[in-house]
Each structure stands twice: as structure tokens, then as C-alpha cells.
Image (spheres, rainbow, N blue to C red):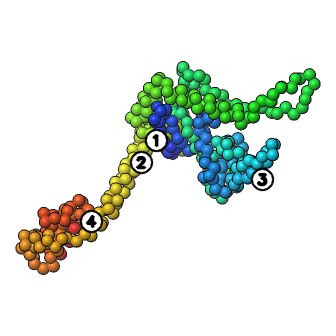
Amino acid sequence: MLRTKITELGKLNFLDDGGLVCSVTSDQPPSLKASALAAFYWASPDPSELAIGDLVAHYEHGVARYCGRRNIPQANGEQKDHLVLEFARSARLYVPPSRSDLIQKLGSADCQLSNLNAKGAKWPQSYWIEALPNAYAWPGIVTFPELPQPKPRRRLVVPGVPVPSSPPPPFSETMAEWHRACAAYRMALHANASYRQAAQEYFERQSREPQPLLDWWVYRTVVLRVGPIEAANVRNRDEHLLLIKQYVLRRERKVEKIRREVETLENCESLEGAARKPIPESVRLFVWRRDKGRCVQCGSRERLEFDHIIPVVAGGSTTERNIQLLCESCNRSKSATV
């Protein structure tokens, strides 16, 4: 018997500009080129949202603990503010706020950094990537920009090798230019007519049937990771898709049930004040005369009460047409059946 584990990772989003992206959190990166991952997926935090002790992941160096901010002297004598990250064995890295896009907040936890940075260690990361698999090489658009690599600085003057008249631009400027090129590619992609049509068609297909999305699946905008736990035999594709549908539809039903319960509680809360409003004296006198001082159900004259025919919580009013006389016993019987 094959048991299948289904894990919800995130959502599919149709952007206002026509882009189709998925936002997911997973400990396994999708199978995309490094340039595509670095360009769009890294969900960097606002430095003001970081608290001392938070765990963060640096794109190039792994997991660290945020230790606050510190002014670092520059070559020109100025002082510049930097984010301080502490790695295992007390190694520290100082990151300028302008490069906070290299950092992702993981949360606050009591754990050993050496274990998190160990070979093969995994931690959840947030991804924000294009959903269509060929979005990073769309026909008719300039090739997606390659991720630049830092070049080692020349430290020695070699005889016979000319020294460049002007040094190359800092790597931070190269990365900034690359990010601008990625943004331009994304804008051109989302404005492309063939891409917009393909994105719309894919979005409509996943609303009807589960669709593969990179290493995952998506159905009714829910992104899922589906994998077998034990494989005594192999299910066919139809059974596989049915399990995905069952998971998502059950989830939707559960959420809808909770939503209705919350709406009911909110309505009851808003009507509590109305339920406590006293019945006007003129209404009480009219009802007493109309019902001749008797219970309208059993005719008793003992322990009479003014009853709302339609309860206030159900929208009933406090008027003569909605008020009647009932004895205590009949009123309790009615309340038990409402």
C-alpha cells in the first residue's frame, strides 16, 4: 500500500500586471538556474523588523544570528551603519543595509548554528518565483541576465602585464546593475502578449485539474509538495491526482466551515445589544390586550412571558407583530426547538 505525504507550501498568485508567480516556503529549492533563484526568490526582511537573536540566512554564507547594527569605519574615514551577523565559532560578517537583499529572516530559536550550517542541513526558505517553467527563457525576450561572479582582486604587479588605468567598478555596483536588468526582464515578460495568454491558460487549468509546477503541484492556487512515504506498489496518475484534489477540497471545506462559524459568532455579538433592549411599554400593553392575557399556545394565565416570534438574533424586531404571550413552559419548549 502506498501512502502519500502531501505538504502545503504556498499559493499561486496572478499579479495585476499579468505575471503569474508562486510564493512558497520550503526547505528544498526548486530546480531553477542560480541566476533565476537569486533574482526573484530571496525574500529579504526590512532591517527594522530584525530583532537581536533572530536567525537569518545569508545567501552566500548560510545561517547566522542577527546581533544588531554597528558603525564601521570606511577607507575614506566615514562611518557607515552595517548589520552584524554571527556565524558558528563566533565568526562575524558585517552587511551594509543596501545589501539586505542577501539576507532572509528565519525567526527566533534556541539552536546551535553549527548544526544549522552543517553539510546537508536544511531550513525553510521563502521563494517568490515565476510559475511558468520557461518564464526565464521566454521566446522573443532578451535572454535572462546571468548572475555575475565576484572576481579576485589583483594584489601583485606582474612584470610585462599592463595595469588597468581605471579599476573595475565595485562588485556591489555590478550586482545593483544586474538586479536592474532582472527587473527589466520581468517587466518585459509580464507585458508580453504570448506570456500573458499562457499564464491565463495555465491559471484556468489549475483551477480545474492539478498541474505540475516546477518540483511541486498546484491546484486551486494551492502549491503542494507530494511524495510517497512507502512504496509497496505504484499508483497510477489518476489516483495521484485524486489524492491532491481530496486534500485541497477537504481543506477548502474546513476553511469554509470555520468562516461560517466566525460569521455566526460575529453576528451574535453585534446583536447582543439589541437582544437586551426592553420591549416598549406601549407594545407590551397592546400584546397583552390582543392575546387576552393568556398563553397563545396552551391558554395558561400563569407565569406569562413576552416572546419574540422571530428571535432578535435572527433579525426579528420588537414590534407588536413579532411579540406574543407564552407561559414559561411553552417558551422554554420553543427555545429548545429553535
Tag 2: amino acid? Arg
Residue 150: x and y in percent read 75, 33
Outermost right residue: 159
Mark 1: amino acid: Val
Q: Earlier in the sequence, mark 4 or mark 1?
A: 1
Q: Please report the residue visible at 63 percent of the width from the left and 49 percent of the height from the top.
A: 47
> Dot 4 corresponds to which residue?
274
Residue at image mark 2: 251
Q: CA distance from mark 4 to mark 1?
A: 41 Å
Per the image, label 4 sits on a secondary structure element best described as helix
Determine whether, in the image, residue 30 is placed left or right of residue 151: left
Report the number of numbered marks.
Answer: 4
Tell me if residue 220 comes above or below residue 134 in the rendering: below
Q: Secondary structure at mark 3?
A: helix
Q: Nearer the viewer, residue 206 or 267?
A: 267
Q: CA distance from mark 2 to mark 4?
A: 36 Å
Give the labeled residue for mark 3. Answer: 89
Looking at the picture, how far across and down is residue 168, in whole percent?
A: 77, 30
Residue 183 in percent (x, y) is at 58, 32
Tell whether 234 sits left or right of 338. right
Quick check: marks 2 and 1 in contact, CB under 8 Å?
yes
The quarter of the image holding the C terminus is bottom left
Label 2 Cα crowd, 10 Å radius (few <14 / some 14-19 / many 20+)? few
Whichever of labels 2 and 4 marks the residue nearer the N terminus, that label is 2
Q: Indicate which disc, 2 or 1, sits on the residue closer to the N terminus.
A: 1
Please give the residue where the numbered disc 1 appears in the rendered image. 222
Q: Are marks 3 and 1 in contact (CB under 8 Å)?
A: no
Identify the mark nearer the N-term, 3 or 1: 3
Q: CA distance from mark 4 to mark 3?
A: 65 Å
Judge by depth and name the residue closer to the eye, 204 or 275. 275
Q: Amino acid at mark 4?
A: Ala
